[in-house]
Amino acid sequence: MRKLRMMPIAITVVISAAALFGGWMLYKQVAVASPLTDAVTQVPGIVKAEKPVIEQDKVRLSVELSDEASLKDVYASVTKQGKAIAGKRNLDIAIQNEEDALLNSIWQTALFDIAEAMETKSYSDIPKTMERVASEHKDVVTVTEMDESNVYVTLRNGEGAKYIVLPRTPNHMGVWPNA
């Protein structure tokens, strides 16, 4: 029986592992990360997009919005373009914004009423609540939008903005047990 030489085996294993993992990293960069970043930076309203973090089942993307951007439109565009590139992975979009104590305080004040409206699916109460809370503060503007999957809330004042995306849970149609 021949004696196995360990040095050539070890070198072969190292080269094979480097080729395998290097190829995976190259694929993630060339086929997913770069095209996604390029597509997202072309969306109107996005000032800056950071390199996406690609995981097995999720792609995390962090973007910074301009002052006049519509959160709903940006979110829809990024979701549409991101799904085409990311494939079956879930797309997790994080909106970067500077912390603003006044806007955080306003959001905390409205949070209970917003949570109640989301839980009871009384989505029309959200704009009313935001307008009521914002009217107590000078130069604070709120924009509330909704689509089939999310409720978008934007709070703005002279110094900054706060963006909140609240996921909607659709009503499930079902069959009654006694039908």
Image (spheres, rainbow, N blue to C red):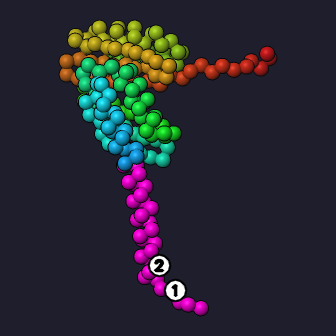
Q: Residue furthest left?
A: 158
**SS of the residue at dot 1?**
loop
- Asked if the residue under mark 1 is in contact with the one under mark 2, i.e. CB atoms within 8 Å, the reply is yes
Badge 2, how many Cα within 10 Å: few under 14, some, many 20+? few
Relative to 119, 105 lies left or right? left
Instruction: Decide which of 78, 149 is in the foreground and name it.
Output: 78
C-alpha distance separating marks 2 and 1: 8 Å
Residue type, label 1? Leu
Q: Is residue 31 above or below residue 173?
A: below
Q: Residue at x 56, y 21 (%)?
A: 170
Q: Residue at x 49, y 43 (%)?
A: 57
Q: Main secondary structure of the magenta part?
A: helix
Instruction: Decide which of 16, 144 is in the foreground and name it.
Output: 16
**SS of the residue at dot 2?**
helix
The quadrant of the picture occupied by the C terminus is top right
Q: Position of residue 93 (x, y in %)?
A: 39, 33
The answer to which of marks 2 and 1 sits earlier in the sequence is 1
Residue 4: mark: 1
- The residues colored magenta run 1-29
Residue wearing tag 2: 9
Q: Position of residue 87 (x, y in %)?
A: 48, 39
